[in-house]
Amino acid sequence: MNLNDPTQFINAEIYDEDYFERGVQTGKSGYQNYTWLPELTIKMAHHLIQSLPIRHGERVLDFGCAKGFLVKALRLLDVDAYGVDISSYAIDRVDPAVRGLCTLVTGPSDPLCISRDYDWMVSKDVFEHMSEFQLRELLQRSRERIKHIFAAIPLGLDDGSGYIVPEYDRDVTHVTKRPLVWWMDLFQSTGWNVDSANHSFRGVKDAWTAAWPHGNGFFVLTRR
């Protein structure tokens, strides 16, 4: 796949019931019965609020919200949170607590994708699903309405042939497999300052970090 070719996008229809509920059996993803896990998601939301930090009154967009579980957790902790996702299957099954706060979009160019000003965009395990063309479009457009970004991204091998964590290669929608320095260069070249770039972030993907200490990148960005 040519990651600079705008025509080579993953079809949103692939993010269907098989992807979220039977990903292992169908060979589409590593997901299995994708459901609300409060002990993990509320903990993650808490650490995001504390460590970024997300201050009282700030507005947060979960980019790639799926069924809205992080939006729900953030709102339980009094954050003004919203979500967007390209999966009609996931948005149709958004948690009832945040129904109407999570929106179906077609991609970065969709006006509904970033329809208001946000203090933070949070994106966990999403950017690797996007081509470099899509990523540049998103990052450039988001500078108009978003102040900060937190992104958790599976990292690729230096030669781009796969991921440091082998399990990530099981997801057929993972198209960008790049090392930490590549991501830093991408962010800087699209108008974002990289405030931090680390291999761990407390409360986010802790089990993966314990097993694969350099398998993920956690980035905090501020628009220039």
Image (tube, rainbow, N blue to C red):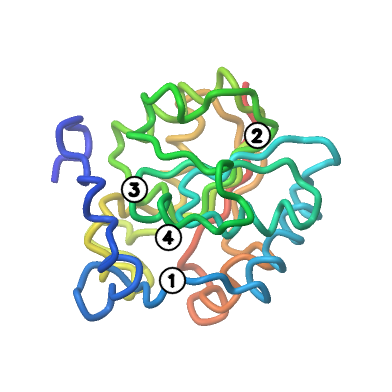
- Residue at 40 percent of width and 55 percent of height: 90
Q: Which mark sits nearer the N-terminus, 1 or 2?
A: 1
Kindly identify which residue carries mark 2: 148
Kindly report which numbered mark, 3 or 4, lies closer to the viewer in this rendering: 3
Residue in front for this viewpoint, 26 or 197: 26
- Mark 2–mark 4 distance (CA, rounded to whole Å): 20 Å
- Mark 1–mark 2 distance (CA, rounded to whole Å): 28 Å
Kindly identify which residue carries mark 3: 88
The disc label shown at residue 154, or none: 4
Secondary structure type for disc 4: strand
Amino acid identity at mark 3 = Ser
Kindly report which numbered mark, 2 or 3, lies closer to the viewer in this rendering: 3
- Residue at 76 percent of width and 46 percent of height: 79
In this picture, residue 184 sits left or right of residue 137: right
- Mark 3–mark 1 distance (CA, rounded to whole Å): 15 Å
- What crowding class fits label 3: few (fewer than 14 Cα within 10 Å), some (14-19), or many (20 or more)? some
Amino acid identity at mark 1 = Tyr
Q: What is the x, y in percent for residue 30?
A: 34, 73
Amino acid identity at mark 2 = His
Q: Which mark sits nearer the N-terminus, 3 or 4?
A: 3
Kindly report which numbered mark, 3 or 1, lies closer to the viewer in this rendering: 3
